[in-house]
Image (spheres, rainbow, N blue to C red):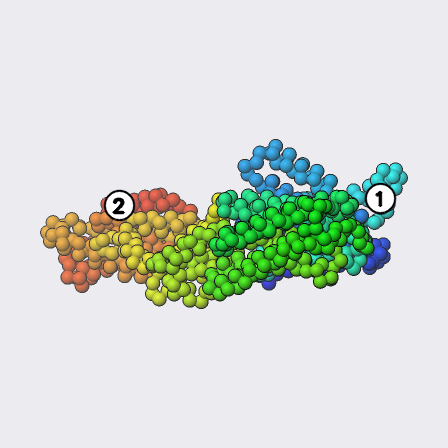
Amino acid sequence: MQKTAAKNGLNLFVLKLIAIFAMTIDHVAWACVPADSVWGQIMHVIGRFTIPIMCFAIVEGYIHTKDLSKYAIRLLIFAIVSSTPFYMFFGQMYSYRQNIIFDLLIALLTITVLDKEKLTLTGKIVSVISLAVISVILGGWPLLTMVYAVIFFYFRKNMKKICIFFSLATVLMVVGIVIFSLVNSKLHFANVDWKWYDKLYLLGFILPLPLLYFYNGEKGGNRYASPFFYVYYPAHLLILALSFGTMNDIRKIFLLLQGTSIFLILVLLVVVAVNNKKSSNASIISMLIFGLLFMVAYFGEIANPTEETIKELVKIEYVADCGFIICFTWFVSDFLRMKVPATIYIVESAISALTVFGVYTMDSNKLFYESFSVGGDLAYPVAIIEPGILYIMFYTCSVLVFAAFLVVNYIMDKESSYIEHQRRKTINYAVFVLWFFIALKVVGISKYDLIAFGVISAMCIVAYGAIQYGFVNDSKIIASSVLLHTSESVVVVDITGEVLMMNDNGRELFPYVQIGKNVRRYKKLKEILDDQKNTLEHDNHVYGFRKEALNENGVVQGYMIWASDITDQIEVFNEIKSKAETDGLTGLCNRSVLEKTVIGEIEKHESGALVMCDLDNFKSVNDHYGHGTGDAVLIAYGEHLRECFKEFDATVCRLGGDEFTVYVKGETDEETLGKTAYKIIAGLYDKMVKSSLPPIVGSSVGIAVNNKGDADFEALYQKADRALYYSKEHGKNRFHFSES
């Protein structure tokens, strides 16, 4: 988006906060303020700030995101997460339609398709129509976010056009709704009872445009700002649902939660499967599959809570539980690079086999359950059990295994690297949430079995940890010992910008940088990472940088920044460059420098003058005094030209032999140039005498003036050359201006 305000305008984070505030006001109005009241209308008008600002943010996110796939997946995941609290709050108002994050995802996909260069026009049309159909069928705001996002994207450099087309689209929408309401009031073809004025508050969508005008082009916030909206959206809906929600059927709420969780696990499974292509990462995929199996079985329990159904589904649940625990152990071993003793797997397998045996033979023995029935004074029937010996063994073994992970993590974390520390935190969080929800039922806080929420929470944490820390960081750990001993300075930064490691040379070069901190804190390092700077001076040395992407299977996980001392190379380069641009005899610039200078000035449409000089009778010096004296004369003549043009911004060059050229920047006054040319000619005799050289040479000068700054170099050169030869042909030792 074109910057339309100064730096002290509104950044994107502030705009999002305004949108969040407006959304909250709107939802509170839906909860407890009559829609047809004055306050209700005012609060709903304020609420219209949300969608335009969030569509604007989606476009900005599309333009600036480094990973579009992750951006879209994040929207999808939070759209799924938000669906249950959304339905809990709005009840039947939205039927099967989805929440605003789903609409924003459709908007993102729309501009992605339209901006895809490789996609044919037919492909774009078909894709956009398909997205429009999905939006009409499932969207909470059908087509609206698509239209707004397209307007913001295509007119992002022209705020005036945004205002015109955005306002036009909004007015047309409201007019369409008014016409629909009037026709429907007569024909009753739709099951809604809208008055023609009911939706006039939608014109409030136009109100945020002045705020967007003051957008300063900056992201704002910090690393926690980006996900804030995604987390806030379902959280505030859940709070409002518990306070004012219209859905009071606990069983239906649980079904929604379970269905949402199953859908979320499927998305996570696809995401992890796409990102994790190494066989060593099969553990997390296996764990997600067993978790999905458990969630599906538990959903079946709630959907059909009869004793026969629950008894059969419990068998599936414990098979999934056993597989989940074994795969979790396997995942911990892979994720933490920690060798788990084979004894642990043997014990887990033995307990799992006994558990499956006990559950599948519960009708003929009391090894797993002393008793099993279905009932209870709850919103829906649940299993009522009395644990047997195998039940106790299974949960005791599970607790011991997970407790062992926590203890080992605590012991080993003291000497681990930053990335290993993050991995251990992931495991600790996953274990905690899993057992937290189990404990709610065990200690009697909840009457309902919430283990399913522990499973889904643990799997979300594990999936995030695997994606965030489970790829190239493997390479970092393996290579760290080598990097620590390399002669180059090395800094490793992950995809979020956090510094993962530095070797000793890196610490000397960046003594202020701390491991675990974000590079945004350190301006120089951030500029290097963003390719804004590739050299750095430190302690009278020059360091050159190169950035190497750390990726696996095409997925960038971070960057390795290498710094080498290139002081000697810079000196050699400067020497070579100097020789390439300098006349070896006189030390003046050569023809290539002259061309670059003149062409550069012409391209900038700057005026100036090209003064071409050569020595009269120079051949006599070589013939009578030798080439050594001739060279001395050339050197003295070069010094003389420098002295004559020292008050100007001039480039003095020797083109070869006794031919010299001066380009004077910005000077076009013929009187001034004529006086300088006269000084060259008149002062040459004294220069030769002072230099103890034969004063037998003179100087002819030709001048070409470029008044408009739009001449061609060759044309200007030819003009000066013709003027020079005019001087030589008309008596020498004189100057002449070229014809315009």
Q: Residue at x 80, y 54 (%)?
A: 376
Counting other residues with Cα less than 10 Å from the Cα at mark 1, is it few (<14), some (14-19), or many (20 or more)?
few
Work out whether residue 491 can be spotted: yes
The residue where tag 1 is placed is: 192
For badge 2, the amino acid type reads: Tyr
For badge 1, the amino acid type reads: Val
Q: Position of residue 20 (x, y in %)?
A: 69, 58
Q: Nearer the viewer, residue 460 or 504?
A: 460
In this view, 263 is above or below 219:
above
Counting other residues with Cα less than 10 Å from the Cα at mark 2, is it few (<14), some (14-19), or many (20 or more)?
some
**Is tag 1's residue or tag 2's residue first in the polypeptide sequence?**
1
Locate residue 242 relative to residue 129 in the image: left or right.
Answer: right
Q: Position of residue 331 (x, y in %)?
A: 54, 51
Q: Which residue extends farthest right?
A: 186
The residue where tag 2 is placed is: 725
Q: Which residue extends farthest left?
A: 624
Q: Residue at x 74, y 55 (%)?
A: 448
Query: Disc 1 to disc 2, how far (Cα)?
Result: 94 Å
In this view, 379 is above or below 511:
above
| Res 712 label | none
Can you tell which of label 1 and label 2 is closer to the viewer? 1
Q: Quadrant of residue 675?
A: bottom left
Q: Nearer the viewer, residue 160 or 542?
A: 542
Locate residue 428 relative to residue 709 in the image: left or right.
Answer: right
Which type of secondary structure does the marked residue at label 2 adopt?
A: helix
Q: Residue at x 55, y 43 (%)?
A: 274
Q: Residue at x 44, y 52 (%)?
A: 475
Q: Which residue extends farthest top?
A: 122
Q: Position of residue 508 (x, y in %)?
A: 38, 65
